[in-house]
Image (tube, grey):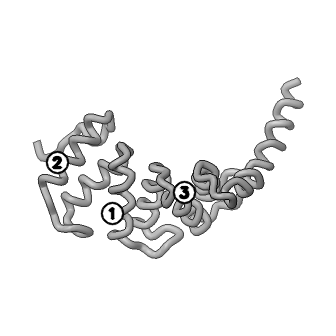
Amino acid sequence: MLAITVTVLSRTKQKLPKWYRKAAEQDLAAAQYFLGNMYFKGDGVKRDTAEAVKWYRRAAEQGVSFAQYNLGALLEKGEGVPESGTQAFDWYLKAAEQDVVQAQFRLSLIFARGDIVKEDKEQELKWLTKAAENGYDKAEYNPWE
């Protein structure tokens, strides 16, 4: 029985990229986000960060907060796309405004460093506090205290 279950699950997983792609091509934002994750992780498809960026961008443009964060992270690192701190900042801000704690924390770091936008201690503290209040452990430790 276990072998049958594993075989069925394996076949189902092999079909997921095909079905997610069909839905994503019809502008279903959730499918675009999940397809982006599959390409980023190499889950059921060959790992391809450029393809992940493509699908994250389409989902992000439709307001999917975690797609906005993931796109920002890839833009900041220059993974699968030319590096762009200013674009990363814009996507992080959109995600942070939707309470994505990782984006809130990244914004606090960006404001602290002052390399993408002008250093701003007030904005740094604002986003660090939001991330901490929303339960992000890394934001609860403040090395400046």
Q: Earlier in the sequence, mark 3 or mark 2?
A: 3
Between the residue at mark 3 and the residue at mark 1, the CA separation in whole angstroms equals: 17 Å
The amino acid at mark 3 is Ala
Residues 58 and 79: in front is 58
- Disc 2 to disc 1, C-alpha distance: 16 Å
| Residue topped by disc 1 | 89
- SS for tag 1? helix
Name of the residue lying farthest toward the bottom: 82
Q: Earlier in the sequence, mark 3 or mark 1?
A: 3
Q: Position of residue 119 (x, y in %)?
A: 16, 63
Q: Does residue 121 appear to the left or right of 109 in the view shown?
A: left
- Whole-angstrom CA distance, mark 3 to mark 2, is 29 Å
Q: Which residue is mark 3?
A: 59
Query: Do the CB atoms of the residues marked 3 and 1 lie less than 8 Å apart?
Result: no
SS assignment at label 3: helix
Quick check: 35 left or right of 139? right
Q: Nearer the viewer, mark 3 or mark 2?
A: 3
Location of residue 118 with respect to 16 vertically, above or below: below
